[in-house]
Amino acid sequence: MLDGRRVLLVVSGGIAAYKSAILVRRLRRSGARVDVVMTASAEKMVGVTTFQALSGRPVLTDLWTEPLAHVELGRAADLAIVAPATANIMAKMANGIADDMATSTLLAVACPVMVCPAMNLRMWDHPATRHNVEALVARGVHVVGPEDGELAEGEEGPGRMSEPDSIFLAAARVLRQGSPLAGRKVVVTAGPTLAPVDPVRFLGNRSSGRMGLAMASAAWLRGADVVLIAGPMALEPPHGPRVVRVETSIEMAEALDRELEGASVLVMAAAVSDFLVPSPSEKKIKRGDQDVLEVRFEAGPDLLVSTREQREKGGVFTLGFALETEDPIGNARKKLEDKGLDLVAVNEAGRPDRGVDALTNQVTLLDAQGVVEELPLMSKVDVAERLLEYLEKRVS
Ligand code: CTP
């Protein structure tokens, strides 16, 4: 994903410095070259050797070892990441102070800069830090985190450095510019919706949400402003998209109605339950001595049909999915027409290596003219990448 890109990683003196070692690995695995610069305090947290081994390059700590190295590194970088970013280094950056190798290099960069703050919650909340962060944001610096949670000294609150995976995704988004989807609103639905029967029971399906999450993440990486409308699922949503949680198809319909406002693209990957119980029992249905439980389900809204007018008016390019057990192309073509889709990705149901709940998927892409492409069986992340390439072409 980041082949040939040069990342300058500045490590300052926070306990979270060990997480930056994992970030180096993640960046390198995706093809980036990583140059690490450490402050003197960072060296007290993690040894230079760790970063040297993981980056495969010398780590710079002293301004005077190679007096022009900071200028050279600053000029060559495609992205500078400061992780962890202490209150101290952000204060220096905000004020243009360059009194060591790390801060001098940061003053010499001509590329986008990202800071990943990590500190005690009161240091983060201090007016001086707030002021410095605001100054950096006003200058176009990307701020990732900090996250809420348990801090090194045992307190709870904002101050934890974001996880390496989240920082990696945020970095990839900055490095991957120029997509026609950048700045556009993309709405993605994912996971199942549930049809409650009583307070403890529901009719649901096996959807893991994996395909929808991969689509949301792939769109976010392209710079889109992504809203993920997510049904109940065990998987964590990816870093980036704004998440709207829903449970039933009615809640998903309401969320869509709000979120389609201003949207350019809708990806309808949710496995919406077609049937619902019109008035679920308010009390738990007791087994008692019943041998049979009869529940009446009625057809609920088809969200693609009910949003059709709004989508057509707003010019929302729509990708739907179709899960079929027979005549996949014929059935998908019918869905494309009946539901007003621009593109439909068809996959077969009932096979362990694709579709609902699988890690991989094999989809065939169809538009009004017919089959666009039959994609091979691959991971859902790769399928999402390919589908996003189509969306980019169509939206541009
Ligand atoms: N979909 C929807 N609202 C529903 C059911 C499905 O918007 N009530 C959307 C899905 O998100 C998907 C597309 O319609 O993008 C096709 O879903 P699928 O389950 O394959 O088809 P159904 O419309 O449910 O038709 P059938 O059950 O007859 O195959």
Image: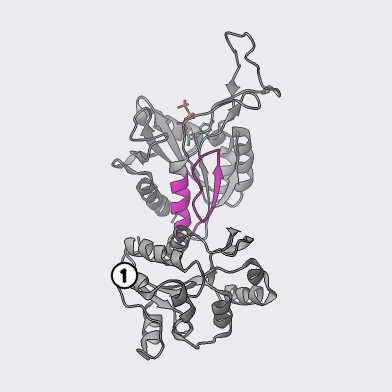
Q: Quadrant of residue 284?
A: top right
- Which percent across, then down, holds residue 306? 59, 35
* Residue type highlighted by circle 1: Ala
- Residue closest to the far right: 282
Q: Identify the magenta region.
A: 213-241
- Which percent across, then down, holds residue 227? 55, 50
Q: Is residue 358 left or right of residue 114?
A: left
Q: Is residue 147 visible?
A: yes
Q: Is residue 295 above or below residue 141?
A: above
Q: Is residue 237 magenta?
A: yes
The tally of labels here is: 1
The colour scheme used to paint the residues is: one colour
Q: Nearer the viewer, residue 199 or 213?
A: 199
Q: Is residue 211 above or below residue 46?
A: above
Please name the residue shown 44% across and 37% down the image.
321
Q: Is residue 115 visible?
A: no
Q: Quadrant of the N terminus?
A: bottom left
Q: Is residue 18 above or below residue 75?
A: above
Q: Is residue 200 above or below residue 56?
A: above
Q: Secondary structure at mark 1?
A: helix
Q: Quadrant of the C terminus?
A: bottom left
- Which percent across, then down, holds residue 148? 60, 58
Please name the residue shown 64% across and 39% down the image.
254
Q: Is residue 77 left or right of residue 204?
A: left
Q: Is residue 249 magenta?
A: no
Please name the residue shown 65% across and 73% down the image.
130
Q: Nearer the viewer, residue 110 or 148?
A: 148
Location of mark 1 (residue)? 53
